[in-house]
Image (cartoon, rainbow, N blue to C red):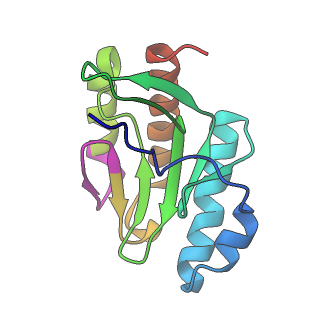
Amino acid sequence: MAKTEIKTKTTEVSVADFVAAVPSERRREEAAIVDAIHRRVTGLEPRMWGPSIIGYGSYDYLYDSGHSGTMCRAGFSPRKAAMTLYLMGDHGRHQDQADALFAKLGKYKTGKACLYVNKLADIDLDVLEKLVALSWDSMNERYPA
């Protein structure tokens, strides 16, 4: 079986340039808020991952199938339909804490490891920051540096 090239990897695109090119003024403003949350939680400067993910840190993974790669430990994308945050899908021993935070977050949708927010005004930003921190801690436990 041929190995496929991983599309989501770091690029040299400037995060500031990417955010400045986001068509929606509201999404640009929300991106600044979500970026500030991630910087506080991670202590890291962001990098672009692929064409549209603003990511913080990285980790190497290896699936049982043999597929492996590198991805950002935390990140988000100011997409047209929703602000998409990439969070740990399984918080392991912290799952009860994650569930309690999600119950207080506000209006959102989730995917396997994504949080979709139509607008930040619909959620509690303090709870969001706690979720980002919990996800960051869970990632660091599962994938030590």
**Occupied quadrant, residue 66:** top left
- With respect to residue 23, does 15 lie above or below? above
Residue at 56% across, 46% down: 9
Question: Number of numbered discs present?
Answer: 0
Closest to the observer: 105 or 37? 37
Question: Which residue is situated farthest in the front direction here?
Answer: 1
- With respect to residue 28, does 144 lie above or below? above
Residue at 69% across, 77% down: 20
Q: Is residue 126 magenta?
A: no
From the top left corner, tell me how far across and down residue 94 is, in percent: 34, 20
Residue at 65% across, 35% down: 42
Closest to the observer: 24 or 21? 21
Q: Is residue 104 magenta?
A: yes
Quadrant of image for the C terminus: top right
Left or right: residue 18 compared with residue 129:
right
Residue at 31% across, 14% down: 93
Left or right: residue 139 compared with residue 28:
left
**Occupied quadrant, residue 51:** bottom right
From the top left corner, tell me how far across and down residue 27 is, in percent: 54, 75
Stretch in magenta? 103-114
- With respect to residue 103, does 19 lie above or below? below
From the top left corner, tell me how far across and down residue 97 is, in percent: 33, 26
Left or right: residue 24 compared with residue 48:
left
Quadrant of image for the N terminus: top left
From the top left corner, tell me how far across and down residue 137 is, in percent: 51, 23
- With respect to residue 78, does 94 lie above or below? above
**Occupied quadrant, residue 38:** top right
